[in-house]
Image (cartoon, helix red, strand yellow):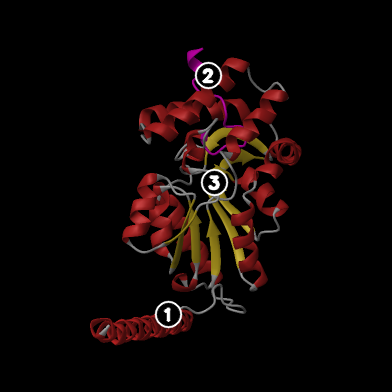
Amino acid sequence: MAALGWLTPRRRSATARSVLAGEAAAEAARKSSLSAELAADESLLSAEAEEPAFPVAGDDRAAAFFDLDNTVMQGAAIFHFGRGLYKRKFFQRRELTRFAWQQAWFRLAGVEDPEHMQDARDSALSIVKGHRVSELMSIGEEIYDEYMADRIWPGTRALAQAHLDAGQKVWLVTAAPVETATIIARRLGLTGALGTVAESVDGVYTGRLVGEPLHGPAKAEAVRALAAAEGLDLERCAAYSDSHNDIPMLSLVGHPYAINPDNKLRKHARALDWRLRDYRTGRKAAKVGIPAAAGVGALAGGTVAAVALHRRRR
């Protein structure tokens, strides 16, 4: 019994020590958790303090520039426009099929052959040659309702609206025909559009371009020129695009955004810590169906009806 009496206190002591250890561990965990929460709150407050609200309300020297295809609209605006023109018998089914295939090829391959693009532009320009600008504008309004209105990305639309609500001007910048881009901009309540200009005389298309398609570096030059004319500070402006072809335009502003980015733009944006937004359903969304080609507007030749490829080769 003496031995048992000697063991009992030790058992009690060990139990007490275990309780004490458990309570101490729980208290330490609670304090650690509280410290982590406080640190997180401080970090959040610090981040908020370092990153002011954007866009800045009332900053009339700031504006926003949005690419169109796959940034504001799902797919290529010129392809949707082409569907409308095909419905109205502007060209044959085989030409629409060629156009659709070219869209997919350019998107997947990411290659722009100057000779091929020139041929595409020439054949596309021949379609609208002799048509009145007013005729194509009227048709464009109908086609927007038929094929484009339901393809606007709500997320990008909200970004544009935020700039408008802040009192800033918002412009589309696209290689698509300026007439098409202007219709879309007006329907979305945006300020206006920069697009490829097809030559017209007395309101009739001549089948030639004014300069070259508004594509790649040309977009940056257009934004730079507009900023100078509007008295904008590009460091306070924002630009949004899905394509690595628009890196020159994105690099021009103080607030570049990669929207639904292709792989090259995604890598570039991450390397430079640009903001990214992806509104697609799944990573493969850009390769489903008839995707918007990188530089599709350049392929389109900058005309309102630039949708049939290799017309001369049929």
Q: Is residue 102 visible?
A: yes
Quick check: 35 above or below 258? below
Where on the picture, by quarter, is residue 17?
Answer: bottom left
Q: Which residue is mark 3?
A: 280
Would you call the spot at circle 1 few (<14 residues within 10 Å), some (14-19), or many (20 or more)?
few
Counting residues from the N terminus, which is met first, the one under dot 2 or under dot 1? 1
Residue shown at 52%/33% (left/top)? Answer: 288
Would you call the spot at circle 2 few (<14 residues within 10 Å), some (14-19), or many (20 or more)?
some
Residue shown at 64%/20% (left/top)? Answer: 91
**Does the magenta run of residues contain 199?**
no
The three-letter code of the residue at mark 3 reads Arg
Looking at the rendered structure, the secondary structure element under dot 2 is: helix
The three-letter code of the residue at mark 2 reads Arg
Looking at the rendered structure, the secondary structure element under dot 3 is: loop
Q: Quadrant of the N terminus?
A: bottom left
User: Which of the two residues, 261 or 209, is positioned nearer the viewer here?
Assistant: 261
Q: Which residue is mark 2?
A: 311
Q: Magenta stretch: dominant SS?
A: loop
Residue shown at 48%/80% (left/top)? Answer: 48
User: Which of the two residues, 195 or 245, is positioned nearer the viewer here?
Assistant: 245
Q: Which residue is mark 1?
A: 33
Report the magenta residues as a range.
Answer: 300-314
CA distance for labels 2 and 3: 34 Å
Residue 131 coordinates in the image, percent (x, y):
68, 31
